[in-house]
Amino acid sequence: MKRGTFRRVLATAALLLWSTVPAFAASEAIAPGVQLFESRRFEEARKFFEPYVEKNPRDAEGTYYLGRTLFALGRFEPAAEQLEKSVEIRPSSDTLLWLGRSYGQFAMQASIFRQAGLAKKCKAAWEKAVVLDPNNLNVREDLIQYYLRAPGFMGGSVRKAREQAAEIRKRDAVRGSLAAVTIHLYRKDDAAAEKELAEAIRNVPADSPASLGLFHFRLGTVYERQGNKALARTHYKKAVELDQGLKEAKEALAKLG
């Protein structure tokens, strides 16, 4: 399997460092390190957590935060090692989420001979995370990306992706709509994506500009794919108007001119 295939399999749409609630409420002993981590002072956080974990190797919180810190520093293999230890000590859905992401990012750097095994570990971690916490929507979204992009012999399945989208919709209508749109766009079904987004825009509460902005942005991408630059521009402008922090919409609008 070529390296590029695994990049497509494992690179999720929004693998953001701050997209999840931490698995643990920080204990007093590691509170200074957690503060460094949350302030994005990752190198200082590493210098705090490494000696702490060396002295306290069975501390699930310490190994979790060291793993997250190493991930932030782009050191994915040692990040996975620490998160594996945390899962062994005290399994949690969030720890498994980041363990899967660590496997995935490490696979992108690994030799072709290791990539398939790491991809399977990534999938296994995420599927176990969903079992531990069915309401962890971040895991379900990552699984959708995996199921859509992985070849069938590695567990790829549009049906499974749709199942995850349906479970997300049960718990969060906005994220469920976006998950469905992700599947439609992957399958190049622009008509279904357009219909889903138009319905979501009609139904989302008026006091949720960020959600509305995101829907308008995604609808803009649909129209741009169709070659309708005028409608794409209209929706990009609306997205920026509703959510000034939506960087992707600003960039898309700038490209259209």
Image (cartoon, rainbow, N blue to C red):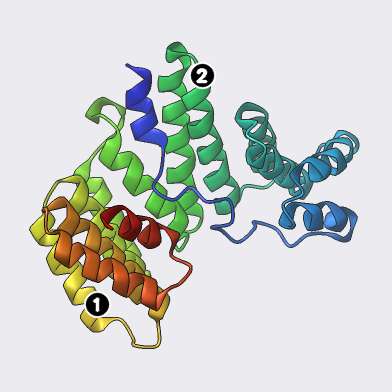
Residue displayed at 44% across by 60% down: 247
Image coordinates for residue 50, horizontal then vertical, percent: 83, 36
Q: Amino acid at mark 2?
A: Ala
Residue displayed at 87% across by 33% down: 54
Q: State how far apart marks 1 and 2 are (Cα).
A: 42 Å
Residue 24 found in image quarter: bottom right
Which of discs 1 and 2 lies nearer the camera? The answer is: 1
State left or right for residue 108 relative to residue 174: right
Question: SS at mark 2?
Answer: loop
Whether residue 237 is visible, yes or no, is: yes
Quadrant where the N terminus is found in the figure:
top left
State the residue lying farthest toward the bottom: 206
Looking at the image, is mark 1 or mark 2 earlier in the sequence?
2
Q: Mark 1 sits on what residue?
A: 201
Image coordinates for residue 102, horizontal then vertical, percent: 56, 36
Q: Mark 2 sits on what residue?
A: 110
